Image: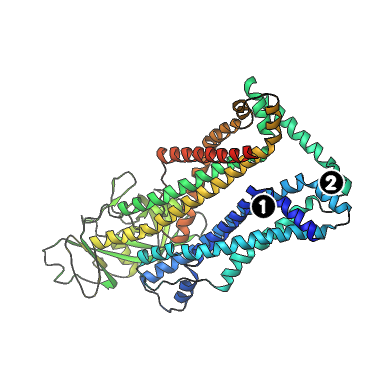
């Protein structure tokens, strides 16, 4: 049996590109999971042990919770990609080596003995890749830890993972890959030796693919029919190329949107704010103190409270937000819409929502929402969507809000002024401090953008490499025959290789709008999870850059793989 194992291992290793890709994808599957989890587990457990969290710790807790979902998404996303590559690898291997396996079964080797060889090979690749990814994730997690320290101003952030996380990241992917290997062996399991040796079962499907390729090629001009017919024989390569284009469009546009979102939010959050300082109280104040209302500086007050919004047709669609209200006559703060126009402050029975709430929960002007504050409930009409509002804020008339809270119309819990004020009972935030806080918050999005860009480039390269590898492997015999018939390298390239260029071109324009739609859905989903607004933005420049990157990667991989094949 050892000689058979050695023979089958050598057969597997002949597919160096696929074996390397499976190892590389196993590394990335583990790396992306542990890269995030090493910055979560210890800190998450520590925050759980704290009875009352302060404001920064609460924000950090929310971020850790969303990062747990992000780590799981990375794990399952790369599991799908790696599993797909593994299935495609074993499908090709069993298809091309049916005769060899049939001969082994003829001389007495059973299916259980043969499948154990492939399970061992999968285990070696999966475990070695998972351990490598875990080690790399440990060192790379410093990036997220430093970003969290900068964003949340928490110093005692530690690195570490729990045993359950280790088991999930190391053993779960290996188990999935082993199950897929066992399933793919079903191509030869319990098959008659004669059927495997003669490959009679594969003729009908091959003939149907050729007939379909012939029919589709007739739709093209006469000069292009032969190259198109040859290209359409390899459906898997076509699917992989289209999938790589679609994936890169999504990942790079998502990274661009995350990066631009930071700039957009930082800029919008400073618009319409003409005050130099803000005083926040933990309780409602009844009247301005003399040192704050002596007339030397312009001062205005505001009220705020936790609230619940009920919207849509479902009565149980309650959304927990913060409601704020400013004096209508003040000039230190203005609500501004998406077009840069000033929104009048709401009157009684009206409400203005933030762009975050309007975008994520599909609210529009003239919609009716119910707001509940404590035991009081009011029905309000949306009169505007403010881009410079706090992410989870809505605004209503101050007198109406104070009435719902049970206070007089002069009561307040915050002050803004065009001068820098101070009060022992209040948290003072200057304009400069607010700008620094917005800048710190943008670090997280920028870090996420870099991660997504790297992931997009890696996934795109892998899928393109698979497509090019499938194309060359499928056409090697055709290339040799054409070369013996006297065709030049340029002519062979035109017939068998260059025909895939239009696939990338068509795929790019075909998937551009769907990819942007997927990006919007992802951003809205993330906004709901982290409870912060992620603004969608794209442009001609970024998509032209993606187009150029795809072509550079394609030609680089094609050139490298073509040179490797010529050496053989």
Label located before the other in sequence (1 or 2):
1
Task: Work out whether residue 61 or residue 84 is closer to the camera in this orientation and state it.
Answer: 84
Colour convention: rainbow
| Among the 4 quarters of the image, the one containing residue 33 | bottom right
Residue 203 in the figure: left or right of residue 89: right
- Residue 86's tag is 1
Q: Residue drawn 37% across and 63% down? A: 322
Residue 374 shows up from this direction:
no
C-alpha gap between disc 1 and disc 2: 22 Å
Q: Residue drawn 55% across and 61% down? A: 133
Asked if marks 1 and 2 touch (Cβ < 8 Å), the reply is no
Task: Work out whether residue 74 or residue 89 is closer to the camera in this orientation and state it.
Answer: 89
Picture coordinates of residue 45 (x, y %)? 49, 75
Q: Residue drawn 14% across and 71% down? A: 291
Task: Work out whether residue 256 or residue 550 is closer to the camera in this orientation and state it.
Answer: 550
Q: Quadrant of the N terminus?
A: bottom right
> Which residue carries the number 2 mark?
196
| Among the 4 quarters of the image, the one containing residue 480 | top right
- How crowded pointer 1 is (Cα within 10 Å; few <14, some 14-19, many 20+) is rated as many
Q: Secondary structure at mark 1?
A: helix
Picture coordinates of residue 527 (x, y %)? 45, 56
Q: Is residue 391 above or below residue 40?
A: above
Residue 273 in the figure: left or right of residue 137: left
Residue at the extreme top of the image, as rendered? 222
Picture coordinates of residue 231 (x, y %)? 65, 32
Residue 472 in the figure: left or right of residue 544: right
Q: Residue drawn 55% across and 57% down? A: 28
Q: Is residue 85 above or below residue 175?
A: above
- How crowded pointer 2 is (Cα within 10 Å; few <14, some 14-19, many 20+) is rated as many
Picture coordinates of residue 38 (x, y %)? 49, 67
Q: Quadrant of the C terminus?
A: top right
Residue 424 in the figure: left or right of residue 182: left
């Amino acid at each position: 049996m050892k000689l058979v194992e050695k023979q089958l291992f050598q057969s597997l290793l002949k597919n160096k590109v696929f074996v390397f890709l499976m190892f590389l994808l196993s590394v990335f599957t583990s790396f992306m999971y542990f890269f995030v989890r090493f910055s979560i587990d210890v800190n998450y457990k520590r925050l759980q042990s704290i009875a009352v969290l302060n404001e920064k710790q609460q924000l950090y807790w929310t971020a850790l919770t969303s990062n747990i979902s992000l780590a799981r998404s990375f794990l399952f996303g790369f599991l799908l990609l790696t599993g797909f590559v593994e299935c495609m690898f074993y499908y090709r291997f069993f298809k091309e080596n049916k005769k060899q396996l049939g001969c082994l079964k003829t001389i007495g080797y059973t299916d259980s003995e043969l499948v154990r060889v492939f399970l061992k090979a999968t285990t070696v690749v999966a475990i070695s890749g998972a351990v490598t990814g875990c080690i790399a994730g440990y060192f790379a997690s410093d990036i997220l830890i430093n970003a969290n320290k900068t964003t949340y101003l928490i110093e005692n952030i530690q690195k570490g993972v729990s045993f359950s996380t280790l088991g999930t990241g190391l053993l779960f992917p290996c188990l999935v890959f082993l199950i897929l290997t066992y399933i793919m062996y079903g191509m030869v399991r319990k098959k008659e030796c004669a059927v495997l040796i003669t490959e009679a079962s594969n003729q009908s499907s091959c003939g149907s693919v050729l007939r379909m390729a012939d029919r589709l090629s007739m739709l093209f001009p006469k000069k292009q029919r032969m190259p198109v017919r040859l290209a359409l024989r390899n459906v898997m390569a076509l699917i992989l190329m289209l999938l790589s284009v679609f994936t890169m469009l999504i990942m790079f546009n998502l990274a661009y949107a995350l990066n631009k979102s930071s700039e957009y939010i930082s800029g919008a959050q400073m618009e319409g704010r003409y005050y130099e300082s803000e005083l926040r109280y933990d309780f409602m104040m009844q009247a301005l103190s003399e040192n704050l209302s002596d007339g030397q500086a312009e001062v205005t007050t505001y009220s705020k409270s936790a609230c619940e919004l009920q919207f849509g047709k479902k009565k149980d669609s309650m959304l927990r937000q913060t409601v704020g209200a400013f004096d209508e006559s003040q000039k230190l703060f203005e609500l501004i819409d998406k077009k840069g126009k000033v929104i009048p402050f709401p009157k009684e029975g009206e409400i203005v929502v933030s762009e975050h709430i309007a975008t994520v929960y599909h609210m529009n002007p003239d919609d009716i929402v119910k707001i509940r504050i404590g035991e009081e409930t009011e029905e309000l009409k949306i009169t505007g969507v403010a881009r410079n509002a706090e992410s989870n804020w809505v605004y209503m008339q101050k007198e109406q809000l104070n009435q719902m809270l049970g206070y007089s119309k002069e009561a307040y819990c915050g002050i803004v002024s065009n001068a820098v004020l101070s009060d022992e009972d209040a948290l003072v935030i200057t304009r400069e401090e607010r700008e620094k806080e917005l800048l710190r918050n943008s670090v997280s999005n920028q870090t996420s953008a870099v991660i997504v860009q790297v992931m997009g480039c890696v996934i795109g390269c892998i899928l393109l490499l698979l497509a090019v590898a499938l194309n060359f492997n499928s056409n090697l015999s055709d290339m040799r025959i054409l070369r013996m018939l006297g065709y030049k390298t340029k002519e062979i390239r035109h017939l068998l290789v260059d025909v895939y260029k239009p696939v990338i071109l068509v795929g790019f324009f075909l998937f551009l709008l769907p990819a942007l739609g997927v990006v919007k859905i992802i951003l809205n989903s993330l906004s709901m999870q982290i409870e912060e607004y992620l603004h969608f933005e794209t442009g001609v420049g970024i998509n032209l850059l993606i187009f150029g990157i795809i072509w550079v990667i394609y030609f680089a991989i094609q050139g490298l793989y073509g040179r490797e094949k010529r050496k053989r």
